[in-house]
Image (cartoon, grey):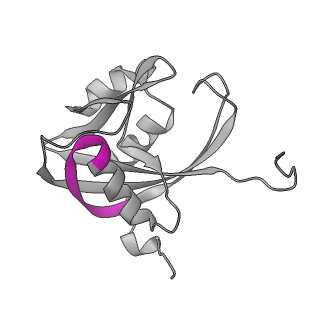
């Protein structure tokens, strides 16, 4: 079945910036044969509120339970086809700030995730060549600069 050219839909994703002791929680994952760095992030599932998706993705990719503290922002990015090993896609990323609550070292991480690690902002910025997308540093930089909106700015209407 061919896609209707009159209809276009971006990939909706969530990402969480978890900060503790001056370090940021990141994931190292394998994408298209490359080892890249990203926030805990992933796609929104059907009928899932954005805030629940952010908490779920963080747990699945890092083993950390977190408490969301703020909405950082909504980011639109058009990924070139070569950057992610596939077709050109547009992403809408909803980013949140969170604090860590509990770590489960026995939790299996999502497929493709090699490990979760804590990095200082300087370490993360210095490793920019391995960022999965330009959204990685942009979201972290905005969060660290104090960009915060109330969580109720993002509302699920049922």
Q: Identify the residue at the far front of this view.
A: 1
Q: Residue at x 27, y 56 (%)?
A: 98
Relative to 93, residue 71 above or below: below
Q: Is residue 59 left or right of residue 92?
A: left
Image coordinates for residue 57, horizontal then vertical, percent? 36, 50
The image quarter containing residue 72 is bottom left
Image coordinates for residue 56, horizontal then vertical, percent? 33, 56
Image coordinates for residue 6, horizontal then vertical, percent? 87, 55
Q: Identify the residue at the far bottom of this view.
A: 158
* Numbered range of the magenta stretch: 60-71
Relative to 73, residue 140 above or below: above
Q: Is residue 68 magenta?
A: yes
Q: Residue at x 82, y 48 (%)?
A: 3
Q: Residue at x 46, y 66 (%)?
A: 48
The image quarter containing residue 101 is bottom left
Image coordinates for residue 81, horizontal then vertical, percent? 67, 27
The image quarter containing residue 40 is top left
Tally of marks: 0
Relative to 59, residue 89 above or below: above
Dominant SS type (magenta): strand
Between residue 31 and residue 149, name the one nearer to us: 31
Q: Residue at x 60, y 23 (%)?
A: 85
């Amino acid at each position: 079945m061919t896609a209707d050219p009159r209809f276009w839909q971006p990939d909706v994703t969530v990402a969480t910036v978890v900060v503790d002791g001056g370090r940021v929680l990141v994931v190292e994952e394998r994408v298209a044969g490359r080892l890249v760095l990203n926030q805990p992030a992933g796609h929104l599932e059907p009928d899932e509120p954005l805030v629940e998706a952010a908490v779920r993705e963080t747990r699945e990719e890092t083993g950390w339970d977190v408490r969301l503290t703020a909405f950082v922002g909504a980011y639109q990015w058009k990924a070139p086809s070569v950057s992610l090993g596939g077709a050109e896609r547009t992403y809408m990323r909803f980013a949140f700030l969170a604090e860590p609550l509990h770590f489960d070292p026995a939790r299996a991480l999502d497929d493709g995730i090699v490990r979760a690690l804590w990095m200082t902002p300087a370490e993360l910025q210095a490793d920019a060549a391995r960022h999965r997308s330009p959204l990685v540093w942009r979201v972290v930089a905005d969060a660290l600069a104090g960009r915060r909106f109330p969580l109720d700015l993002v509302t699920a209407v049922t």
